[in-house]
Image (cartoon, rainbow, N blue to C red):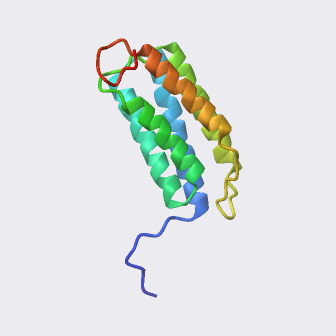
Amino acid sequence: MLKDSHECAPPLPEFLLEAQALLAKSEDCLSHLHLIRNDEEAINCLLASLQSLAQIAARHAISPLAEFALHIHGVLERTAHPVDLNDPILDALRSCLTLMAWQLELVDPHNGQLNLDDSEQLMLIGELTQQVTQNCTCTYPSCSH
């Protein structure tokens, strides 16, 4: 049998295992940031894990999870300067990752469907954005104050 020339998404059980591993890695990076604040390696690890999670979720057409991971990634990477990842920001990130873990558990293992209301995602993204914005004490245009 000939293989298609385009890349096929791996089966759903493999996606779930990979997504859970990436989420666990994100949580480990976050725990590291609680211990060693603003550690560049841990920040890069968190950003890379979120981006990978978004990519594999998008490959499987699980857009609520993909979009949520991309939003979190975007809020953290959007600033033109390093953000001091203080406790309120880390707590907001923890809430986002907790919701993401819960949503991953709700993905139907047979068809990949994740039907949910995105209001909690929007609320948590808003909280994270607010914490990052409040933390911004610079004069860059990206700062809102």
Residue 114 visible in the snapshot: yes
- Which residue sits furthest bottom? 1
Instruction: State the residue in front, 91 or 122.
Output: 122
Quarter of the image where the C terminus is located:
top left
Above or below residue 129? Residue 51 is below
- Which residue sits furthest top? 137
Percent coordinates x, y for residue 127 in the rendering = 57, 24
Percent coordinates x, y for residue 97 in the rendering = 58, 34
| Residue that appears at 30% across and 23% down | 141
| Residue that appears at 54% across and 37% down | 24
Above or below residue 67? Residue 83 is above
Residue 120 lies in what quarter of the image? Answer: top right
Residue 99 lies in what quarter of the image? Answer: top right
How many numbered marks appear? 0
Instruction: State the residue in front, 128 or 60.
Output: 128
Percent coordinates x, y for residue 56 in the rendering = 48, 54
| Residue that appears at 51% across and 64% down | 10
Above or below residue 52? Residue 125 is above
